[in-house]
């Protein structure tokens, strides 16, 4: 069997950049949620690498759950929210932090947020590793932003292009 070639991508965030970014986010979140029972909700699949690093950097007791929703086909948002996997836990009266990999148009996240708010959480905030503010179409309040980047299509550290490149330990651009 011939092994697939390792891609050479232009790095956007190195492993060191990512570690520093996650540590900074964790410090802010830990300060804000001291003595609070926090439920992290990871949006699959893209957030699972970030969430596992963030959770351990938080160094405080948290619970976790995951949901999977998409409004993407290939590289472009179709706008319509499709829930592929719902939550196992109730968010009613819970302090909830949605964990997202990257916010682009914001359409997916704003719809997920609206849906969760209907269940009456005690609080609901969002943390994203990466924000592309130039592309925003929906006004969604994001309390914690790891890094802002220009309008690039990026992959790695959980983030894919057509399900590929999630395994890369850094973030690069294939543009
Ligand atoms: P939005 O609804 O346009 O904000 O879409 C956000 C979702 O689209 C992210 O959670 C990613 O899963 C995906 N996405 C947005 N930008 C990129 C990118 O540059 N590379 C890979 N996936 C992306
Ligand atoms: Mg995502």
Image (cartoon, rainbow, N blue to C red):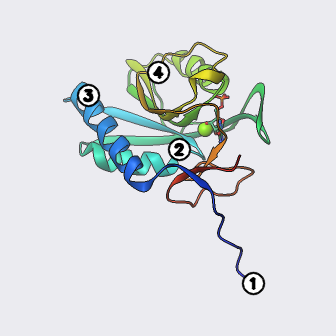
* SS category of the residue bearing label 2: loop
Q: Earlier in the sequence, mark 3 or mark 1?
A: 1
Can you tell which quarter of the image residue 114 is in?
Answer: top right
For label 3, the crowd category at 10 Å Cα-Cα, with few meaning under 14, some 14 to 19 and many 20 or more, is few
Mark 2 and mark 1 residues within 8 Å of each other at the beta carbon? no
Between circles 4 and 1, the one closer to the viewer is: 1
Instruction: Provide the residue designation for mark 4.
Output: 142
* SS category of the residue bearing label 3: loop
Q: Answer whether residue 12 is visible to the viewer in this image.
A: yes
Between circles 3 and 4, the one closer to the viewer is: 4
Between circles 2 and 1, the one closer to the viewer is: 1
Q: Earlier in the sequence, mark 2 or mark 1?
A: 1
Instruction: Provide the residue designation for mark 3.
Output: 33
Q: Is the CB–ligand 2 distance for label 3 below 8 Å?
A: no
Residue at mark 4 to residue at mark 1: CA–CA distance: 44 Å
Say the numbered circle drawn on residue 2: 1
Q: Answer whether residue 157 is visible to the viewer in this image.
A: no
Q: Is the CB–ligand 1 distance for label 4 below 8 Å?
A: no
On the picture, is 150 further left or further right than 90? right
């Amino acid at each position: 069997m011939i092994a697939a070639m390792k891609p050479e991508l232009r790095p956007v965030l190195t492993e060191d950049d990512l570690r520093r970014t996650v540590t900074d986010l964790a410090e802010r979140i830990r300060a804000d949620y001291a003595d609070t029972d926090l439920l992290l909700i990871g949006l699959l699949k893209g957030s699972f690498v970030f969430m596992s690093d963030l959770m351990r950097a938080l160094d405080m007791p948290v619970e976790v759950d995951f949901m999977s929703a998409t409004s993407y086909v290939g590289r472009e948002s179709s706008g319509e929210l499709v829930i592929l996997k719902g939550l196992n836990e109730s968010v009613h009266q819970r302090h909830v932090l949605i964990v997202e990999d990257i916010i682009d148009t914001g359409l997916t996240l704003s719809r997920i947020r609206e849906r969760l708010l209907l269940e009456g959480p005690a609080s609901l905030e969002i943390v994203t590793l990466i924000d592309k503010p130039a592309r925003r179409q929906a006004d969604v309040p994001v309390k914690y932003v790891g890094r802002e980047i220009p309008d690039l299509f990026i992959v790695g550290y959980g983030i894919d292009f057509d399900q590929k490149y999630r395994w890369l330990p850094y973030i690069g651009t294939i543009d």
